[in-house]
Amino acid sequence: VQLQASGGGSVQAGGSLRLSCAASGSIAGINNMGWFRQAPGKQRELVAIISSGGSPNYADSVKGRVIISRDNAKNTVTLQMNSLKPEDTAVYFCYAYARATFGIPPSDYWGQGTLVTVSS
């Protein structure tokens, strides 16, 4: 399973960005998909995650400002971020808990990361 993220960039505070991630390769099934982020000097943290059934969960720090969605037919997950703040600045990583082959347990998969910079 390979994850390819896109959509990062620089924006002023209050602005919006949309991150997209597509899963490809050998995929037997994808359970959860989501986004994590890592700011300089900090640990990686959950931003938002969505189940295969479409149920989302958000970090408290982004609730009300972020919407996660997925397209199961296309194996994609999207993160719409609004009202961005300087503290949202981080490298954002796409994540999937997926099964590459039938008959083996699912594993964690990560995309390469995309930088989001929010200036004040």
Image: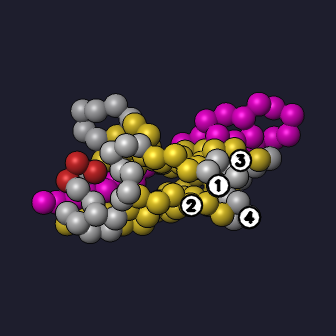
93 or 120, nearer to the observer: 120
Q: Earlier in the sequence, mark 3 or mark 2?
A: 3
Contact flag, marks 3 and 2 (Cβ < 8 Å): no
Confirm or deny contact between disc 1 and disc 2 (CB under 8 A).
Answer: yes
In the image, residue 88 lies at what x, y percent?
Answer: 28, 51
Q: Quadrant of residue 116?
A: bottom left
Residue sitting at x 16%, y 60%: 119
Q: Amino acid at mark 2?
A: Ser
Q: Is residue 7 visible?
A: no
Q: Earlier in the sequence, mark 1 or mark 2?
A: 1
Count the marks: 4
* Label 4 vs 1, first from the N-terminus: 1
Q: Is residue 30 left or right of residue 57?
A: right
Q: Name the residue nearer the viewer: 64 or 105.
A: 64
Residue neighbourhood size for the residue with mark 3, other residues' Cα within 10 Å, grouped as few (<14), some (14–19), many (≥20): some
Residue at mark 2 to residue at mark 4: CA–CA distance: 13 Å
- Observer-side mark, 2 or 4, equals 2
Residue under label 4: 73
CA separation, marks 4 and 1? 13 Å
Query: Of callouts 3 and 1, which one flags the residue occurring earlier in the amino acid sequence?
Result: 3
**Residue to which mark 3 is pinned:** 30
Structural distance between the alpha carbons of marks 3 and 2? 14 Å
Task: Identify the amino acid type marked 3.
Answer: Ile
Give the distance between the C-alpha atoms of the residues marked 4 and 3, in whole angstroms: 11 Å
Q: Secondary structure at mark 3?
A: strand
Q: Which label lies toward us, 3 or 1? A: 1
Counting residues from the start of the chain, the first of labels 4 and 3 encountered is 3
Circle 2: element type: strand
- What is the span of residues highlighted in magenta in the rendered image? 97-120
Q: Which residue is mark 1?
A: 54
Asked whether disc 3 touches disc 1, contact meaning CB atoms under 8 Å apart, the reply is no
Q: On the image, numbered disc 2 is attached to which residue?
A: 69
